[in-house]
Image (tube, rainbow, N blue to C red):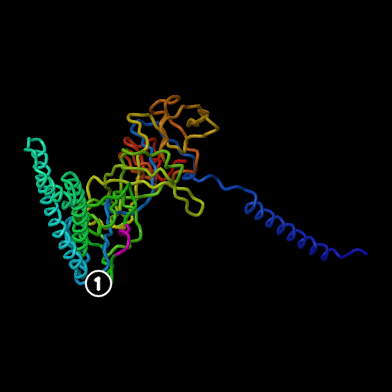
Amino acid sequence: MVLPRHKLRGLSFVNVALVAMVAVIALTAYFLFFKKDPPAAGATRPSVAVARGEVIASVSSSGTLQSSQTASPQFETSGTVTQVLVKVGQVVAKGAAIAKIDPSAAERQLRIAQQNQIAAVNSVTAAEETLGDAQDALDAAEEASASPSPTPTSGGSQQSQSQGQGQSQSPQVAVSNAEASLAKAKADKEQADQNVEAAQAAVDATTLKAPIAGTITAINGSVGSVSGGSSSGASSSGSGSSSSTGSSGQGSTSSQGSASTSTGFADIADLKTLQVVAAFAEADAIKIKAGQSATVSLNAEPGTTFTASLASVSPTPTTTNGVVSYSATFSLAKLPANARMGQTANVTVQTAKAANALYVPSTAISTSGSTYTVTMANGGGTREIKVGVRGDSFTQVMSGLNEGDQIELLQGAIGGSQAGQSGQGRTGQQGGGQFPAGGLGGAGNGGAGGFRGR
């Protein structure tokens, strides 16, 4: 059947409209899903110039401010606390009295020991006199036997024999016995002297004294409590303990400042010699050693840094949740005015430095095993280089490049908003994309700020 011409004309218009709609849909899908956007000007790979300056490699960690010397003294003898002579925050000198316990029992034992000592002295004196008499008698007998005497009559002989039988011992035996008695008396006196010293020490121990000069940071007892009689108070672990002559009841002291649980009557810390104790991961710990310089910043004083020196690195590791770390102690060259024990400190240790060296951003270097290459700007291809000190953001170039050569950064692009934030002219700042002295902000790229090294 043949349709009329006006109906055929209507179908043609419908077909054309359908084809047009399909074409629009196809073009829309092409632009949405297949056609790539033109590269943005700010996302192009930037180039920088090889510069000359100082490159510093460093490792960082965080820790706390601690006292370099602490002590937790405890009473050496048991008793009831009768006086507490200090308060928290008070500065005390070495040997200063901290607290006292009831001395009655100790003083009574001292009096008994002193009386025994007097009796022992008298025994020695009496034994010396007895020995002197026995020695005189022996000398007289020896003189009498040595001189000639008339022939005795029978009556006189009988009288002499009768006197000899009345003597209990010969002069030699009397001297020997007197010497033994004197020796025993002297031994008894020596023991009595020791007993007096021990009793006096017990009396002295009823007054607890500060083993170090410092600030009282805690008092763990009170008047009326029973204290003492235990081992010396716990203190910071460190390179051995030390005690002060004449200071009774003191706990061990430490020069390392590691924190520990106190069992002493009081806690003392030297707040004039604070130090930083921080833990470094094992990969970083092998790079640090005593004597290296460091910088310290406190969270409580942002923007302020202090000079420090690495005093020691613990030879033994600490493992926490499977992570191995080593404790390092840093001495501050100058103590911050507002520094307090326990404050969080951030430490950066300088591990290597190259002065007047060629350097490039670490983000410009491609690494393949022991081979290092850079991409030259403007289609110059790649070039192999030899590297030296590798900082966090910059790497020293030993050979392969010249100062002023233009190279491309391989990781990301530098946006215009980062220009001026590269920290140009700040020597040796390795973190946060800051440049060494001289900067890399040339070549119209606004610097290489914001890039962190591998």
In this picture, residue 143 sits left or right of residue 248: left
Question: What is the chief secondary structure element of the magenta stretch?
Answer: loop
**How far from the left and from the top, in percent, is residue 383?**
50, 27
In the foreground, 20 or 288: 288
Q: Quadrant of residue 90?
A: bottom left
**How far from the left and from the top, in percent, is residue 378?**
49, 31
**Image: 399 above or below 242:** above
In the foreground, 145 or 222: 145
Q: In which quarter of the image is residue 427?
A: top left
Q: Is mark 1 on a helix, strand or loop?
A: strand
The residue that appears at 27% across and 67% down in the rendered structure is 78
> Bounds of the magenta span?
229-234
The residue that appears at 19% across and 57% down in the rendered structure is 192
In magenta segment, residue 231:
yes
Q: Residues within 10 Å of mark 1 (few under 14, many from 20)?
A: some
The residue that appears at 38% across and 38% down in the rendered structure is 57
**Image: 156 above or below 263:** above
Residue pushed farthest bottom? 224
Residue pushed farthest front? 154
In this picture, residue 6 sits left or right of residue 54: right
Which residue is tagged 1? 80
In this picture, residue 402 sits left or right of residue 333: right
In magenta segment, residue 392:
no
**Quadrant showing the N terminus:** bottom right
**How far from the left and from the top, in percent, is residue 376?**
48, 30
In the foreground, 169 or 294: 169
Three-letter amino acid code at disc 1? Thr
